[in-house]
Image (cartoon, helix red, strand yellow):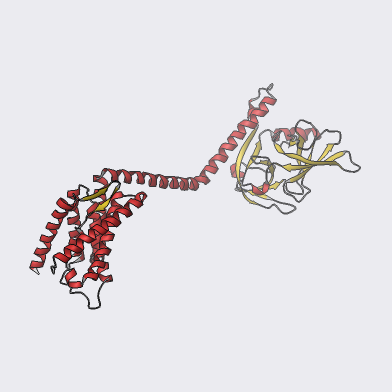
Amino acid sequence: MNSLITKSVIRAVLLVLLQGLVFRRIAFQMGDFAFIHLFIYPIIILLLPIRTPKILQITIAFVVGLSIDAFYSSYGIHASALVFTAYIRNFVIKLLEPYSGYNVDESPTLSRLGFSWFLSYASLLFFTHLFFYFAVEAFSFVFFFEILMNTIFSFIASILIVMLYQLIFRSDY
Amino acid sequence: MKNILLIFIKYGTHLLFIAFQIICFTLIINSNKEHGDIYNNTKSIFFENLNNNVDQLSDYLKLDDQNDSLIRENAKLMDILINQRITTVVDTISDTLLLKQYSFIPAEICNKTIHLRNNYFTLCVGSMDGAKPMMGVISAEGIVGITTKVSDHFSQVIPLLHSQSRISASIRGLDFFGNLVWKDSNPRIMTLETIPKHASISIGDVVVTSGYSSIFPKDLPIGTISNFEIAKGSSNYVIDVTLFNDLNNLSYAYLVNNRLKEERLNLENNTNE
């Protein structure tokens, strides 16, 4: 249990740094086509142990979001989106609950719950997160087309990276 | 206190979520220039609309008061207008009394009948407000009738639409005068009698008060001639007059207070004796 918390914290710090220092600089751009942005930090929230108190989940999301915001100098936008993601994570977990139920002490990882389960879980939350993020970033539904394009292409790129990450590091946490 | 705590335990996650979102959006609006601009712009549009709506609503709620003040102002203006006209007619006489021969009392119509043969109106002013029997009642567009009975707070009016109503009227530009009576059942049409047939009249002429009766001031417009004929075996016209005002659609009127009425009636009665 103790090691779970330690590893979660280390993973969170590493992922925030990775997002802030590496993925922030990677931007695919072909002329006007600049809709791909890589976001992997929501995985921090996704991989929290299922049993984590909801209030704690939301608070972690807020703190992580603010740290990401510090790198992006976009105060509040990532935090808002990540808090929202953490908030709906519980509903998504309930929605996708397998017949056998969860082992609530553990993190919902690919190696534990299977490829298809994890893909749908990550897809739902990533899509919501990205859509919320780009909507808040644009701050007006006048830019609906841009919001949608950004969401779709960033979603495809990010989910690829996240699935690769889960397949390569077949960790149980 | 216990209940508040219970609510927080039960809905803590949701409340915390909302609280974090509020913090985030406050941060977004205050720290990011573009977002702040969009927010302020939207806010101003929204509140402008809201303010406009609230203004409209409060205007609407104030309409009653405004009506009251307008009708009082109208009475004052009519006072000035009609008294002025009279003084210009008799401008050789410099009698200060003449300057204020007529004054007007604004009145709300509280009850009325229209479709009977003998209709009555009730005004919400009475002797406390200065109303007296046999006062003229006029509206903005024409005349309404004559008061008959007056109590402390109400007065009864015999309107034009009464079989017994007789208004002394003449045609503008001519000095013939006749009686305006209501024979039709149409509340917009009156009949003007006893205009001799040698008077040259035409459809569209304006019928005005004659001023001979001491109830109405002279030259108040009543209506226009819509039709006329000479009755068989008679030397007078029978003239249909279409009223300017629709008595059916009327909620305010003015009582005409003629200050020289008693003096005039005294004189006229003395002569008759």
Image quarter (top left, top right, bottom left or bottom right) of the C terminus of chain A: bottom left
Q: Is residue B19 visible?
A: no
Q: Residue at x 20, y 61 (%)?
A: A162
**Between B131 and B242, the one nearer to me in the picture:** B242
Give the image quarter of residue A50.
bottom left
The percent coordinates of residue B60 (x first, y second) are 50, 47
Question: Would you place residue B27 above or below residue B270 in this image?
Answer: below
Q: Is residue B251 above or below residue A152?
A: above
- Residue extending farthest to the top is B92
**What residue is drawn where x is 56% and y is 39%?**
B72
Residue A65 at x, y = what percent? Answer: 20, 55
From the viewer's perspective, tell me whether residue A71 is left or right of residue B170.
Answer: left
Give the vertical position of A167 relative to B186 (above or below): below
A140 to the left or right of B228: left
Query: In the depicted view, which residue is nearer to us: B7 or A137?
Result: A137
Name the residue: 14% across, 51% down.
Answer: A21
The residue drawn where x is 32% and y is 54% is: A149
* In the foreground, A130 or B207: A130
- Which residue lies most toward the front here? A30
